[in-house]
Amino acid sequence: MAAFINNDITAAGLLVLAKGVAGKQINYTKIVLGDGYLEEGQTPRSLTGVVSPKATIDITKCVVNGDGTVTVGGVFTNDQTNDGFYYRELGLYADDPDEDVGEVLYCYGNCGDLAEWIPPTGGATIVEKTIDIVTAIGTATNVTAYIPADAYATKEDYENYKAIALAAQATANQAIALAQQAVEIAQQAAASVVDLSNAVQQNTSKITTLWDAVFGDITTNPFQITFANLDGITLTSGVWNATLQRLEC
């Protein structure tokens, strides 16, 4: 893997950074790989573009780290690399907040002779690299990146999506379980209402008889026992009507 020991924010990048600290938006646009060398005495600060660009990578990640830096990343594959190249340069581009300036090289790194060979497509070696660039943003808070809708998904993206999908499924399962419990409770409540209604209907005649016994004038024998005779009964009040086989007050 290439080691970018010679890296820095460019002069144009510092202007964008200053505008971001002042409250304007910093919007990163792309990552570019190249195989160029820096000339003698040349530094990343003075560059306005990658010396010899070979591949452009869509941004798939832009994470503000909370320590004055941001991590901007993407995925490189050699599936469209017709000619192999030495992965020597790494540049991050951003839009200048001032519309008349346009896109600028924000930061740049060059690893010189420590470059990594990237074989062309169609060979035995398939290259897939997750590339993360950590660069300074100071106290800027309005930091974004242009991420195309069809940008290459990283393993991290997949894991995040998987976690979100699993959480959503768990929530859906809980909702289904709660709905089933609600249906069971409703069914039990309905059954209880039916039981109560049946009980009321079954006891209506008894309640009516009791009401008549307490507040009404009883003209029939509401009791299950008969008074055909007074065997075993000592009458202390009332009159026994032998004809109607009842006690009368």
Image (tube, rainbow, N blue to C red):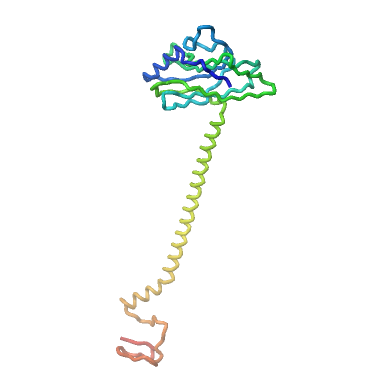
Q: Vertical placement of 8 versus 155: above or below?
A: above
Which residue occupies the extreme top position in the image? 40
Q: Residue 85 at x, y = what percent?
A: 62, 15
Q: Quadrant of the C terminus?
A: bottom left
Image location (x, y in percent) of residue 14: 42, 14
The residue positioned 33% from the left and 86% from the top of the image is 248
Residue 180: percent from left, percent from top = 50, 52
Residue positioned 30% across, 88% down in the render: 238
Residue 239 versus residue 8: which sits nearer the camera? 8
Task: Please indicate whether residue 148 sits to the left or right of residue 196 in the image.
Answer: right
Where is residue 224? Give x, y as percent: 42, 82
Nearest to the observer: residue 97 or residue 132: 132
Mark count:
0
Q: Is residue 203 above or below residue 231?
A: above
For residue 178, above or below residue 227? above
Quadrant for the N terminus, please.
Answer: top right
